[in-house]
Image (tube, rainbow, N blue to C red):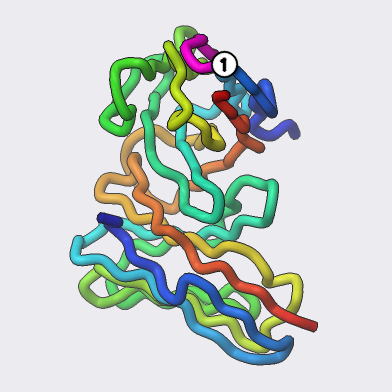
Amino acid sequence: GAGVSQSPRYKVTKRGQDVALRCDPISGHVSLYWYRQALGQGPEFLTYFNYEAQQDKSGLPNDRFSAERPEGSISTLTIQRTEQRDSAMYRCASSSLGTGTGGWEQYFGPGTRLTVT
Amino acid sequence: TQLLEQSPQFLSIQEGENLTVYCNSSSVFSSLQWYRQEPGEGPVLLVTVVTGGEVKKLKRLTFQFGDARKDSSLHITAAQPGDTGLYLCAGSYNFNKFYFGSGTKLNVKP
């Protein structure tokens, strides 16, 4: 079946522009996560949703970053007034379970490479 | 400051050698996961451990969760070039939000 997809795969934008990154999770997956990953480093948590509800947004760096998942499926991460320090790989992951037990798996998407010039 | 410290950062070995990588924290986790990530790809889950002292085996890979649930190790027996990649550990307090370590970059030379 189809895995997690993200679009665009690459985005180059000028400083000050807004960008919207899209994540299409595996069909039926309850939880959706956004991470930012620097080259050669582990993913850094940004935010996550169960269904359409944003459960935790403590990892969003500042108020220029926001995320939504209005129908509990596709999610959009929006960065307003982009800055060069926002350049990174942004990864989305989904999992089939919501709160509760361990042993579940996060399936990661291929990521969106954002470059702010 | 990283919540999870992984060591070593880099490891380059010959095919057939054994190796162990470590994931350490001062925090107690409810669960800990290990992932492998290949260049240009997203991380792929290898294992989840939830019980202190738990040992899980996946072919040539052996994972151990520390008794106090603060640390974990991954041991690879007879490493192969296909094992090359970035190995990441990720801990969670509540099975929802995961904190990733900075990873161990493994290179297995043929």
Instruction: Locate residue B73, reporting x and y percent.
Output: 42, 76
Hey, which quadrant is residue B45 in on the image?
A: bottom right
Check the residue under mark 1 and report the chain it is in: A
Residue B18 visible somewhere in the drawing = yes
Q: Would residue B110 be counted in the magenta stretch? A: no
Image position of A58 (left or right of A96): left
Quadrant into which the N terminus of chain B falls: bottom left
Residue that badge 1 annotates: A14
The quarter of the picture where residue B58 lies is bottom right
Whether B36 is drawn above or below A67: the answer is below
B1 vs A93: above or below: below
Taking the image as shown, residue A103 lies to the left or right of residue B17, namely: left
Q: In the image, residue A55 lies at what x, y percent?
A: 30, 25
Q: Residue at the spot x=29%, y=23% of the render?
A: A62
Coordinates of residue A83 in the picture (x, y in percent): 44, 22
User: Vertical placement of B54 versus B27: above or below?
Assistant: below
Observer-nearest residue: A67 or A14?
Answer: A14
Q: Residue furthest bottom?
A: B17
Quarter of the rendering occupied by the C terminus of chain B: bottom right
First to last magenta residue range: A14-20
Q: Residue at x 34, y 20 (%)?
A: A54
**Magenta region, mostly helix, strand or loop?**
loop
Secondary element at image label 1: loop
* Foreground residue among A52 and A58: A58
The relative height of residue A26 versus residue A51 in the rendered view (above or below) is: below
